[in-house]
Image (cartoon, rainbow, N blue to C red):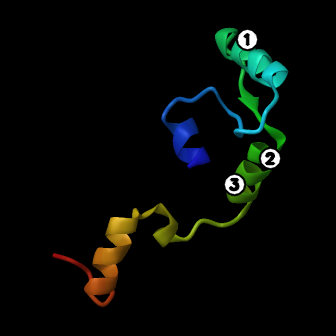
Amino acid sequence: MLEGALKAGANGYLLKDVSAEELVNAIRRAVAGQPSLSPEAARVLMKNVSEPALPHQEMTGGELEILALDGGRTLQ
């Protein structure tokens, strides 16, 4: 979800439990064109970037379901 939001053009990502002050500061940074990530979101992003990507991680749930139904054979 985090990576998808950033790839879609989000300028930052905050969790629901941020304080009002953190939210206001993040909005100000976004208006100024500066990124804003909560520490927890940054940890998740760094973990995902540092782990080698497997081909199936790029697939959607529906694609994985179709692949499972097909027994892993290449669809033509």
Residue at image location 33% in from the left, 68% down from the top: 63
Disc with the residue nearer the chain's start (3 vs 1)? 1
Direction from residue 66 to residue 9 in the image, left or right: right
Tell me the residue that label 2 is attached to.
Answer: 40
In the depicted structure, whether residue 68 falls above or below residue 57: below
Disc with the residue nearer the chain's start (2 vs 3)? 2
Direction from residue 30 to residue 70 in the image, left or right: left
Q: Residue 58, image x and y in percent?
A: 47, 61
The Cα–Cα distance between marks 3 and 1, rounded to whole angstroms, is 27 Å
Res 34 → quadrant: top right
Picture disc at residue 43: none
Instruction: Indicate the secondary structure of the residue bearing disc 2.
Output: helix
| Crowding at mark 1 (Cα within 10 Å: few <14, some 14-19, many 20+) | few
In the depicted structure, whether residue 62 falls above or below residue 43: below
Picture disc at residue 49: 3
Q: Nearer the viewer, residue 74 or 25?
A: 25
